[in-house]
Amino acid sequence: MKKKKNLFQFKSKQISFDLTKELMNLFFEHAKKHDLLFIKEYSLNE
């Protein structure tokens, strides 16, 4: 019984870690696009 619970805790930790990684990737992708747009606008304004 106890072993099963530990396995479940490990699994949920693993899942939240994967989700965090996904969110970070999405955030970085978004930031990159944002930066590119910003740079484009900035160079147009120069």
Image: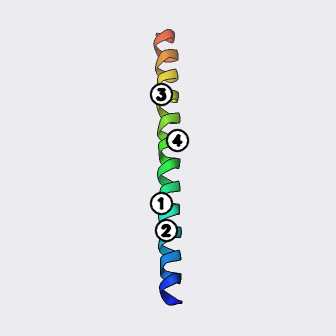
> Residue 26: which disc?
4
Q: Nearer the viewer, mark 3 or mark 2?
A: 2
> Residue 34: which disc?
none
> Residue 35: which disc?
3
User: Picture coordinates of residue 16 (x, y %)?
Assistant: 52, 62
Q: How far is mark 3 from mark 2, CA to CA?
A: 32 Å
Residue at the spot x=46%, y=20% of the render?
39
Residue that label 2 marks: 13
Name which residue type carries label 2.
Lys
Of label 4 and label 2, which has the lower sequence position? 2
Name which residue type carries label 4.
Leu
Q: Nearer the viewer, mark 4 or mark 2?
A: 2
Q: How far is mark 3 from mark 4, CA to CA?
A: 14 Å
For the residues labelled 1 and 2, say whether their Cβ atoms are less than 8 Å apart: yes
Of label 1 and label 4, which has the lower sequence position? 1
For the residues labelled 4 and 2, say whether their Cβ atoms are less than 8 Å apart: no
